[in-house]
Image (cartoon, rainbow, N blue to C red):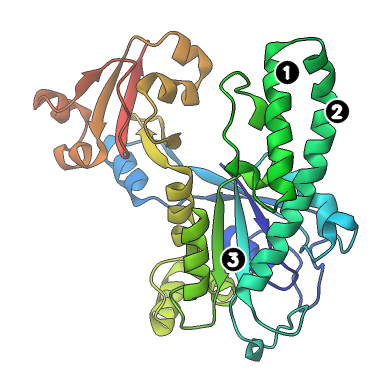
Amino acid sequence: MKVGIVGLPNAGKSTLFNALTSGGAQTGDYPFTTIEPNVAVARVPDERLEAVAETVRSSELVPATIDFHDIAGLVKGASEGEGLGNQFLASIRETDAICHVVRCHSLDSGVPHPDGRVDPLADIETIETELVLADFEQVERRLNRVGKGAKSGDPEAIAEHAWLQAVREALAAGRPARSVPLPAAAPDAARNLQALTSKPILYVANVDEGDSEPPEAVSSHAAAVGAGVVAVSARIEGELAELDPAEAEEMRESYGVEGSGLARLVRAAYDLLELITFFTAGEDKEAVARPLHRGATALEAAGTIHTEIMEAFVKAEVIGWQQLVETGGYVAARDRGLLRIEGRDYPVADGDVITIKV
């Protein structure tokens, strides 16, 4: 899973990036401290994976991961060349979701705001306007490419061209690309466009020390546009990232912070993208946590392991992770009739431990 991080300068993007990934991106209390796009791979913590691996005596743990793409802070007018952020938007067009870091902590923190005030909704509007303008330019370019095919009479090109015109009208009115339904006759149109405003959004409210909830205005806005929202103090998470686990937990308790920022962000991202996790594990083999879209089948799960396994799929042995742990392994689970045989159309459940038979 790939997540692009956007926000105004000094919103806390790079501080959060460092805290979540230990990526070491340059940070500072002035705009544009991130000059080149930073990319880091963060492991998704999951206690279930450790329990499964210990139960079946796996040789190695391979957790699910999230790629975080941190770009330079956007400013008003970025789509017209202001600041540095717009030139890096292309680096997050292929991401699965956008993590919009919104400054919600006060000026008393000592970190200046580009406009000299703290107004989360105004900041959200600034960023989302720039994303809309960047998408408008992208649509214009795509229309020119698709126009030739549409003139030749190609049905899919005609449908995509009509959809792009509708998207252009929506963007011109300030509405996101996701507000325009995708035409059945051009199922790849959205993938071809890679519009930033078609992606799911997770608002990360960068709050003051001691705050555990996003401001009501941000939560209400997120609900209105169908986005996710989570509160994190990037400064605190940055400090915690430099400590060993025991010291970090003690510090969290002193701040009244429940769990790590990464865990909260991952949970919110999973909910936003409707992802679940299934596991593959064996004795002296890797125990692997594998993200999968909710509602996906056993056959699609096999495809996330390897396309050849998907093509040779015969059946799947399935057991819930907790049942596997409680019974002490595959042999005992099989003896008790808890290992189920499922076909290719079986809808995978979160926490399933699956062995594909080919």
Quarter holding residue 349: top left
x and y, in percent, of residue 321 in the image: 26, 39
Residue type at tag 1? Ala
Q: Which mark is residue 171?
A: none
Gap in angstroms between the C-alphas marked 3 and 1: 45 Å
Quarter holding residue 312: top left
Residue under label 1, please give it: 157
Mark 1 secondary-structure assignment:
helix
Gap in angstroms between the C-alphas marked 3 and 2: 42 Å
Residue type at tag 3? Ala
Indicate whether 73 appears above or below 65.
below
Looking at the figure, which quarter contains the C terminus? top left
Quarter holding residue 35: bottom right
State which tag comes first along the sequence, 3 or 1.
Answer: 3
Asked if residue 193 can be seen in this view, the reply is: no
Residue under label 2, please give it: 144
Q: Are marks 3 and 1 in contact (CB under 8 Å)?
A: no
Q: Nearer the viewer, mark 3 or mark 2?
A: 2
Q: Does residue 80 appear to the left or right of 183 in the view shown?
A: right
Residue under label 3, please give it: 19
Indicate whether 336 appears above or below 101.
above
Classify 10 Å Cα crowding around label 2: few (below 14), some (14-19), many (20 and above).
few
Residue type at tag 2? Asn
Looking at the figure, which quarter contains the N terminus? top right
The residue at the far bottom in this view is: 108
Mark 3 secondary-structure assignment:
helix
x and y, in percent, of residue 317 in the image: 27, 21
Mark 2 secondary-structure assignment:
helix
Q: Residue at image x 16%, y 42%?
A: 326
Q: Nearer the viewer, mark 3 or mark 1?
A: 1
